[in-house]
Amino acid sequence: MNLKNAFAASVSVTALVASTLSVSAQTDLNALYEAAKAEGQLTTIALPHDWCGYGAVIDTFKAKYPGITINELNPDAGSADEIEAIKANKGNTGPQAPDVIDVGLSFGPSSKAEGLIQPYKVATWDRIPDSAKDAEGYWYGDYYGVLSFLVNTDLVSKVPTSWADLKGADYANSVALAGDPRASNQAIQGVYGAGLASGATDAAAAGEAGLAYFAELNKAGNFVPVIGKAAAVAQGTTPIVVAWDYNALAWRDGFAGNPAAQVVVPTDSVVAGVYIQAISAYAPHPNAAKLWMEYLYSDEGQLGFLAGYCHPIRFNDMAARGVIPQDLLDKLPPAEAYAKAVFPTLDEQAAAKGVITTQWDAVVGANVQ
């Protein structure tokens, strides 16, 4: 079953277990906390505070579990950088060795195959969709979103509604990806999404079509070869950025109306992306890493993601049990924006990623940095 079908099927589930941890599970959690506190630190990597509500999630974890310092490495790193950080720090117990990673779905199986991550199943394991986790517990989905356009409407009078629109003369020197497509999963999916909008259905063909699209955008002078972030949009360096909806919505809120901004889910291609968590096989603080995972996959941690506009992987489970506050639901884009969402399978992601990362320089020729 692919991810799209799995999420659809999970909506119909009516018999779900209660969310309260059993006494034995709570005892185990207390013991895990003591072991984590003895280690004294958790090292994370690539967790920007404005991504998926991570700033508040980190602060809440620290308040809930005093005595554990969080060492945050390179918040702006891409998924490939996270994997390289594990490889570069095998046997290193110092502050540069990440304990945990948050990466695009396609990096899960490859990291498992290379022996870079270790298995661990959280207390809420059974409530994570089977298609969004490794059966042996090596990696597990944490949240998902869809690709969108964040548009500075103080500078862009004609708001684009589709990938096709971005080719127009109205968007000269205006469009950027929120990452380097040679390393960032978010940017890779952006290229893939543009390819799907062209009508390609095969993953590799969509990757090739996406490259051709950005080559055309670059040649026309519409593509800006910078890593698009909130500041770049606000300053007008690149008034349109292709980003996950949760990033775009959080950045828009951060502007507080200055500049005015709009978040658009393109009508011609709605690509959903699942991110995953995993613990490094070489984690210097394995108990702190496990405690972090327990928190992220608890109702409290999952709602923390939702507060940052990410759809937590256990969204349907919690919605069915009525534990999602209405004010959080009211802040989400309308349901119809997600109606056509496509969840690429692992094989599809791998095929597209291989084409995009290896051919970007030759086909597009834009050095994103």
Image (spheres, grey):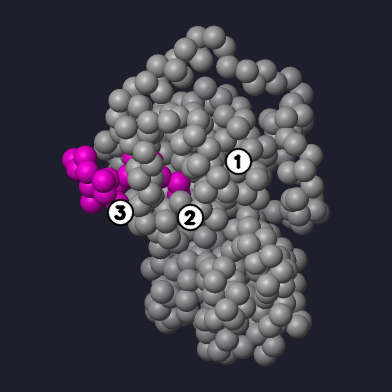
Residue name at image x 74 percent, y 26 percent: 321
Q: Is residue 101 magenta?
A: yes
Residue name at image x 52 percent, y 60 percent: 186
Q: Residues within 10 Å of mark 3 (few under 14, many from 20)?
A: few
69 or 367: nearer the viewer: 69
The numbered mark, 2 or 3, whose residue comes first in the sequence reads: 2
Q: Residues within 10 Å of mark 2 (few under 14, many from 20)?
A: some
Point out residue 324 in the picture as x, y percentages from the top left corner.
73, 35
The numbered mark, 1 or 2, whose residue comes first in the sequence reads: 2
Classify mark 3: helix, strand or loop.
helix
Side of 39 relative to 135 (left or right): left
Identify the image quadrant of residue 271. bottom right
Residue name at image x 67 percent, y 18 percent: 18
| Residue 84: mark in rendering | 3
Figure quadrant of the C terminus = bottom left
Highlighted magenta segment, given as a residue range: 85-103
Side of 194 relative to 291 (left or right): right
Point out residue 280 in the picture as x, y percentages from the top left corner.
33, 39
Residue ID for mark 2: 48
Residue name at image x 69 percent, y 88 percent: 170
| Residue 240: mark in rendering | none
Residue ID for mark 1: 304
